[in-house]
Amino acid sequence: MQHANRLVIELTGVVKRYGRDTTEPPHRAHALEPHTNGPTGAPLRARALDGVDLQVRAGEIFGFLGPNGAGKTTTIRLLLDLLRPTLGKVRVFGQDPRSAGPALRRRIGYLPGDVRVGTRQSAHELLTHLGQLRGGVSDARIRSLAERLGLDLRAPIRRLSKGNRQKVGLIQAFMHDPELLVLDEPTSGLDPLLQREFLAMVREASDRGRTVFMSSHVLSEVEQVADRTGIIRDGHLVAVESVDELRTRAVRRVEVVFGHDLPDGAFSEVSGLEGAEVHGRTLRGRLTGPADSFVKAAARHEVVSFLAADPDLEELFFTYYAERGGRHAA
């Protein structure tokens, strides 16, 4: 990891409120997202973020996890000067996004959470135009990314499906090889094969020393690529930790069908298994952390089928709250 001690993103005591008494100025809309000043009909002084402190270092892949409405998109828009904080400090490459201007924005590749463009241009025309605004991007680079993601560059933007609009968004974020990639729900609308291709692109960017800040509500995709994760809920940063630490808390629902009825207490001493229910030949329960103990216990019996659901983000939140007495912590 290059320049690992250099801060790329720094938020200190950041509060963001929406509401009729906040005098929020119109923000500079990004080319690929609709113009909005915040949630429509927001209640008076609704807090989207409440005292967020966060640091992301150079070369790091940082996964920003939380359910819809948790504050992920608000945080990202503050980084890009699409919104301004009510209180606190936001710095990107040590600079205030408001005063740094276009020079800072050219160092960033941004994918909005909702890619919507009303232009009559083709995908190729739009990407070429955006490349020129960023100091020039070769046509070969655009075509290479389009081929990799399976995008027909001749298609008019306004006729593209959600998945193909997402491909356009990804191409424009990656095409100028920015120092910082800020990606809001990047796999939305992509099929599983393209999701895997996207994750490969993120790893390659990291290998070149680029920094990636990636928001998601899908725990499994962040697990695959991130170095560290931040978990946000209701505008509070609940925790920041490594992916290895996150895995020790991840809760998976398991269901195993055996070739025979299980004896009483067969899984009562298995580490990490909670809420186990045995009905004849079927065992169901919740597995937290490493699965080694559970797998070894299951292997003592004839296994007919084994199902393990992806980790559940909401259950992970409850794990944090149970450990910390229901208090928010960062």
Image: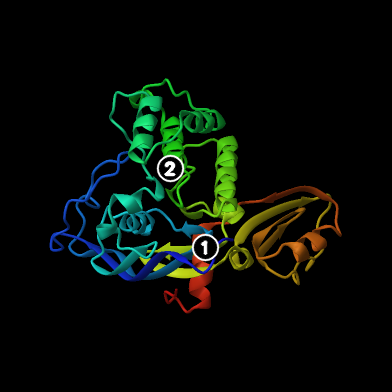
Q: Tell me how far mark 2 sits from mark 1, CA to CA.
A: 21 Å
Q: Residues within 10 Å of mark 1 (few under 14, many from 20)?
A: many
Check disc 1 and report its element: helix, strand or loop.
strand
For badge 2, the amino acid type reads Ala
Numbered label attached to residue 173: 2
Left or right relative to 293: residue 75: left
Display colour scheme: rainbow
Q: Residue 143: x and y, percent? A: 50, 28
Give whichever of 232, 34 is nearer the camera: 34
- Quadrant of image for the C terminus: bottom left
Closer to viewer: mark 2 or mark 1: 2
Please say if 17 is above or below 136: below
Residue picked out by circle 1: 229
Q: Residue 182: x and y, percent? A: 42, 51
Residue placed at 16% from the left, 55% from the top? 25
Give whichever of 132, 198 is nearer the camera: 132
Q: Quadrant of residue 172?
A: top left
Numbered label attached to residue 44: none
Check disc 2 and report its element: helix, strand or loop.
helix
Q: Residues within 10 Å of mark 2 (few under 14, many from 20)?
A: many
Comes first in the chain, label 2 or label 1: 2
Q: Quadrant of residue 104?
A: bottom left
